[in-house]
Image: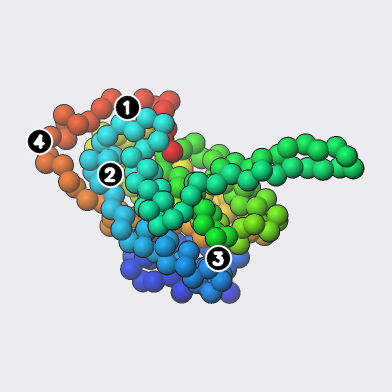
Amino acid sequence: MSTLHLVPDDIRENYHVHEWRNAAGILTTACPDEWRDILEALRSFKLLQSEILKKGGRKSPIAKRIDSEFYRLGWKERKFATAIVVDEAHVDSPTHSVDCFKGRVGVEVEWNNKDPFYDRDLNNFRLLFDLRVLDVGVIITRGSELQSIFDELGKGDSYGASTTHLNKLLPRLDGGGGGGCPVLTFAIKRSLYVEDVPPEQIAKLREPDDPNEVEE
């Protein structure tokens, strides 16, 4: 039985929401403070035309802004020092960093990365859940329909088919990529798009695409 009905209507209007193993139900009942933060961060977000046009380097200004909202609410980037021990043999096996972590909830922001990063995130959630330090994993990403916006702005080559968007995430989520870990995902819809650049300035702000470069 799905627990997506617990996600407020205004969130579902602006994000494609999917879950694995009743993640929404666990967040609302077992992690109410973290759930409140997640809703606040999602409600505060707008997809700005100016940030799509701006070249982001290693990390997009869009992903940075989402991260910063969580940090403002007390979340922190977190890496766990784990190890494999067999008899007296000790082998360090640290986890990948989680973008935002608080309580027992982890949030990963995947705006425009290579799509195998979804495998990394889901596997990390699975491992941390099995180690009993994580109750729910959350992924915030982009809806696949946003490609039409990127094409309109002449930025389509920067957002390839093999980058992180919803159509690449769902097969991994529904295929059990997170193992036993409950996972809730939010993909940004076009309804959050704000045209904040005057039409006559778009050409000046647009920078050449590098098809080999993606941003987190």
The kind of secondary structure element at disc 4 is helix
Label 3 sits on residue: 23
Give, as a three-letter code, the residue at label 2.
Answer: Ile
Give, as a three-letter code, the residue at label 1.
Answer: Asp
Label 4 sits on residue: 200
The kind of secondary structure element at disc 3 is helix
Residue 126 placed where, x, y %? Answer: 65, 53
Q: Specify whether 203 is left or right of 15.
A: left
The kind of secondary structure element at disc 1 is loop
Asked whether the viewer can see residue 142, the reply is no
Label 1 sits on residue: 209
Q: What whole-number distance in Å separates the C-alpha atoms at marks 3 and 4? A: 45 Å
Asked whether the viewer can see residue 45, the reply is yes
Q: Few, some or many C-alpha atoms within 10 Å of disc 3 (few <14, some 14-19, many ≥20)?
A: many
Q: What whole-number distance in Å separates the C-alpha atoms at marks 1 and 4? A: 20 Å
Label 2 sits on residue: 149
Q: Quadrant of residue 92?
A: top right
Residue 91 placed where, x, y %? Answer: 77, 36
Give, as a three-letter code, the residue at label 3.
Answer: Ala
Q: What whole-number distance in Å separates the C-alpha atoms at marks 2 and 4? A: 17 Å
Q: Which of marks 2 and 4 is nearer the N terminus?
A: 2
| Quarter that holds the N terminus | bottom right
Q: Which of marks 3 and 1 is nearer the N terminus?
A: 3
Q: Earlier in the sequence, mark 1 or mark 4?
A: 4
